[in-house]
Image (spheres, grey):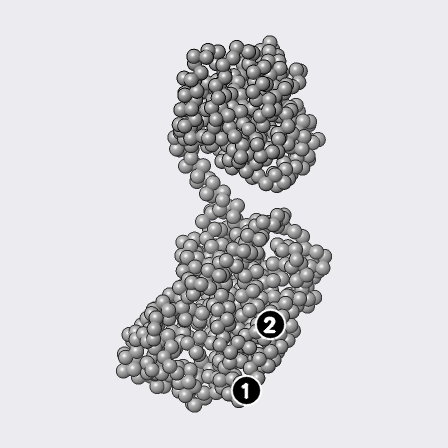
Amino acid sequence: MVAQASKEERRQVESNELGTFGGVFTPSILTILGVIMFMRAGFVVGQAGIMQALLILLLAKSITTLTSLSIAAVSTNTPVSGGGAYFLISRALGPEFGGAIGLALFLAQAVSVPFYVLGFTESVVRSFPEMSAHFTAIGLATTGVLFVIAYVGAKWAIKTQYLIMGILGLSILAFLGGAASRFDTGTFVQNWTSGYRGPGMSFWVVFAIYFPAVTGIMAGVNLSGDLKDPGRSIPRGTFAAVGVGLLIYGAQTVLCGGAQSRDQLVESSFETLRAQALFGAGFLVVAGVFAATLSSAIGSFLGAPRVLQAVARDRVIPALRPFARGSAAGDEPRRALWMTLGISVGVVLWAGGDSEGGAFNVLASVVTMFFLYTYGMVNLAAFVESFSGNPSFRPRFRYYHWFPAMIGAFACAGTAFLIDPASAVLAVVVVVFFYAYLRRRVLQVSFGDARWGFAYSRLRKNLLRLARMPVHPKNWRPTLLVLTGNPKERPTLASYGLWIGAERGLVTLARVLVGDSAEIGRLRKPAADQLNQFLNQSGFQALTSVVVSENIDAGLTTLIEGHPLSPLRPNTVLMGWSVDPERAVSFLHHLNAVKRLGMSLILLDDRGATPDSLTRRIDVWWRGQENGYLMMLIAHLLTLNWEWSRASVRLLRLIEDEAGREPSREALQELVNKARIDAQVEVLVSEDPFPQLLMRHSGDASVVILGFKVPQESEGEAFRFQMYFERMLSELPATLLISSSGEADVLA
């Protein structure tokens, strides 16, 4: 269950209810039309040529278009709350992936604020060199002004962005109009082909430089909690921003490629844009650079706190709970905004004193990686939702298929490594660290995410595939049904079941509740929770099953016979040895029921304490391969657990003739070698009664493994069977009695 929000978090708030244009398109297009358009687009055209520059643009836009398709599918499949990409990912891939990406996305956007601020500050200083001595002060002042705009609220921030978008639009008209007026066909032809200059320059290097120009589609998605109709606005606004960005960048590539020489494009494209501006309005180009950096900074100032607020409200990380609170008017994440401000000021102070800017460039690259991985995870989320065939995946956006989402996920990962392999690896390490931290926590949150559907789809296909495959002893695995009852009363029984089967097979801990189903049915869930709690405390993974029956015998019969004939049906039943003479008949009935179903039997007599020392010893008494093969496998499976990793195994055999000692020893040693099991062989020659000999040689063992044959059902046989083994087991340590169905073969 998802943790319930506190009363303070549930209070009624006045929604901002932004529309498609203001809430999605405006922040997205302003982030897309950033500093790359002014400072690097001409360089890309000059290096790659017009033809390859257009190809780079189409390749880059294809990644964001594929991601936009995934965004449209996921956002129209479920009611979208705040948190943007975090919300979409967490509801599809679960709280661990969602929380990891949410934290990474918050850090990326929080650090993006000072990056854009410093970009604005640098453009101011380059335009007005006399202000270079006040670089850090300008950066801090700009951060403060942007903080105030974001603090007032998203509505006012969007209104500010309308003004910025107007300035940016005039700037684009100025430099595109100037380029169009100076367009020359000869220059266009000369710049059509590539002309890479400088060491290491190539198509992919230039692609890496240009790719940040097409990012920014998450700026609108991150305002999902402030939208009036997210399911409608997010797809329309995102696609509109991608389309408009494609047209503007395409026009810039063609027009500037025909208006500027290759030298101008590579070395001084920005200065040429100012010089060639329409009507000599070069100041509009400078204003456009200012507008591009400030708009991106505002977008990050709005997005980062909302991601942190969404993560906090999902209770994924308890320490973040204070950031869940929003303002009464508009539910503004002001506490998270203060956190973003602190990070921004710290980075401005640090980077402002770095004259060379090396660390700044590394962090900028890492930020780009986080955004790319976010895009990749959105594609992965959409792929998992669709590919799993989950009936609940019914997006209103119909133009979607899982294949483009898969391609988009791979493309994002590949682009990250093409841009900067070192930064890509660093970003992966950070995301994996967040994921591992959340995975180790006992998360009590659940979003009904698509992982269940995906796992179900794969399980279904694999089960049907296994059902068609022939069974071979080499593929035998322990699939145990452990009739454990209350695990607190018989912890050793459950522990042996988990030691034997949890790591290499499948274990189901089962319990019977005796009584009328109408009266005690309500106790079924607490009993199942008790079994799961035992598993959590012991550190094992297993299934649980609880049945309600009028009596214990009927309940055990239901558990034993109720499993379907499937590849994962239990092949072995583990139950405790019954010491109650009054239950001898019903006990034997249950043993025969198991054998009739073709299942192996393991009976545990745990009256002897299992020592905790490092000198554990497992004694296996060999009396033929009918049960012996399974007995040896059980001993081997025990030693695969860390609690038994240093235990020694003895394979013992009793014979009556001294002449047979050496042949018997050689036969057993050959068996051990063929079985590839580390065991010590010991052959005993004696005519003493077996129970007496058993106690003499295995009384100090940690566990004894014996074979037995289930007798036919009759009252007399039941009592004789119980009395015979009761005398044998009374003075032994913990003992496992094995009756094999013959499926297990230690030599396979």
Looking at this view, is 534 or 644 the one in front? 644
Say which residue appears at 52% left-offset and 12% top-offset: 686
Residue of label 2: 346
Looking at the image, is 35 positioned above or below residue 672?
A: below
Q: How many marks?
A: 2
- Note whether 363 is above or below 79 in the view shown: below
**Label 1 neighbourhood size at 10 Å, few (<14), some (14-19), many (20+)?**
few
Q: Would residue 645 appear left or right of 178 to someone viewing this image? A: right
* Image coordinates for residue 446, horizontal then vertical, percent: 59, 49
Give the residue displayed 61% in from the left and 60% down from the top.
310
Residue 479 in sight? no
Residue in the image at 48% along x and 58% along y: 428
583 displayed left or right of 277:
right
Give the residue drawn at x 57%, y 74%. 350
User: In the image, is 695 to the left or to the right of 655?
Assistant: right
Q: Element type at marker 1?
A: helix
Q: Which residue type carries mark 1? A: Met
Determine which residue is flagged by label 1.
131
Q: Residue furthest right?
A: 7
Q: Which mark is residue 207?
A: none
Quarter occupied by the C terminus: top left
Instruction: Kindly report the distance in space between the C-alpha atoms of the residues bearing marks 1 and 2.
Output: 22 Å
Label whose residue precedes the other's in the sequence (1 or 2): 1
| Disc 2 crowd, CA 10 A, few/some/many (<14, 14-19, 20+) | some
Tell me which corner region of the image, top left, top right, bottom left or bottom right, holds residue 469: top left
